[in-house]
Image: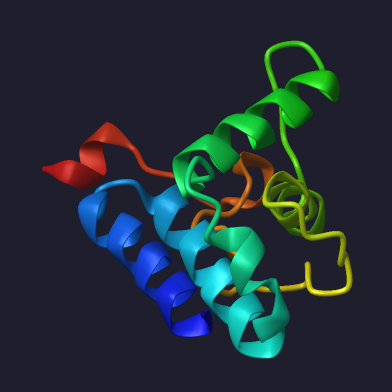
């Protein structure tokens, strides 16, 4: 049953390679299944998909919306996904799809840049 659940997730990920969110949630579910094979039956539910779980994440984020910004932390988002699939184990929500982002540009106040038009000629 675990193999069928993995196949279902991989199939959905393959069909939607352009959607990075499907890839991240699919990777999380694959990792979850490796550690919790007993949850395969819940993930195999025919009408449950990664795409629909993203819709549930959106609804959860909307509840926390501040102004025009609605964000969930990784653990919050993955807990929503597990709950959507009927898995009540929140212990596995610490999955990291990528390392934390590091800003590439210093804040404007930290940039020491001074140029004169004459310097260009």
Name of the residue lying farthest toward the bottom: 35
User: What x and y, as percent, mark residue 21?
Assistant: 46, 49
Against 80, is 70 above or below?
above
Question: Who's the residue at 70% across and 24% down the image?
Answer: 59
Residue 8 located left or right of residue 40:
left
- Colour treatment of the image: rainbow
Q: Is residue 77 visible?
A: yes
User: What x and y, as percent, mark residue 64?
Assistant: 85, 25
Residue 66 located left or right of residue 81:
right
User: What x and y, as percent, mark residue 105?
Assistant: 51, 54
Against 10, is 69 above or below?
above
Name of the residue lying farthest toward the left: 121
Question: Who's the residue at 69% across and 88% down the image?
Answer: 35
Question: Who's the residue at 52% across and 36% down the image?
Answer: 52
Q: Quadrant of the C terminus?
A: top left
User: What x and y, as percent, mark residue 9?
Assistant: 42, 64
Residue 32 located left or right of residue 20:
right
Q: Is residue 100 visible?
A: no
Q: Nearer the viewer, residue 117 or 39?
A: 39
Figure quadrant of residue 74: bottom right
Q: Nearer the viewer, residue 56 or 86?
A: 86
Residue 44 located left or right of residue 7:
right
Against 31, is 120 above or below?
above
Q: Nearer the viewer, residue 29 or 111?
A: 29
Question: Who's the residue at 24% across and 61% down the image?
Answer: 14
């Amino acid at each position: 049953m675990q193999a069928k659940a993995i196949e279902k997730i991989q199939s959905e990920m393959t069909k939607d390679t352009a959607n990075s969110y499907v890839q991240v949630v699919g990777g999380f579910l694959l990792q979850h299944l490796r550690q919790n094979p007993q949850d395969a039956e819940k993930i195999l539910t025919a009408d449950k998909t990664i795409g629909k779980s993203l819709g549930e994440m959106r609804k959860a984020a909307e509840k926390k919306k501040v102004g025009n910004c609605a964000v969930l932390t990784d653990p919050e988002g993955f807990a929503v996904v597990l709950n959507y699939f009927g898995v009540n184990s929140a212990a596995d929500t610490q999955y990291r799809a990528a390392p934390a982002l590091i800003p590439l540009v210093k804040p404007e106040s930290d940039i020491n840049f001074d140029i004169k038009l004459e310097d260009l000629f």
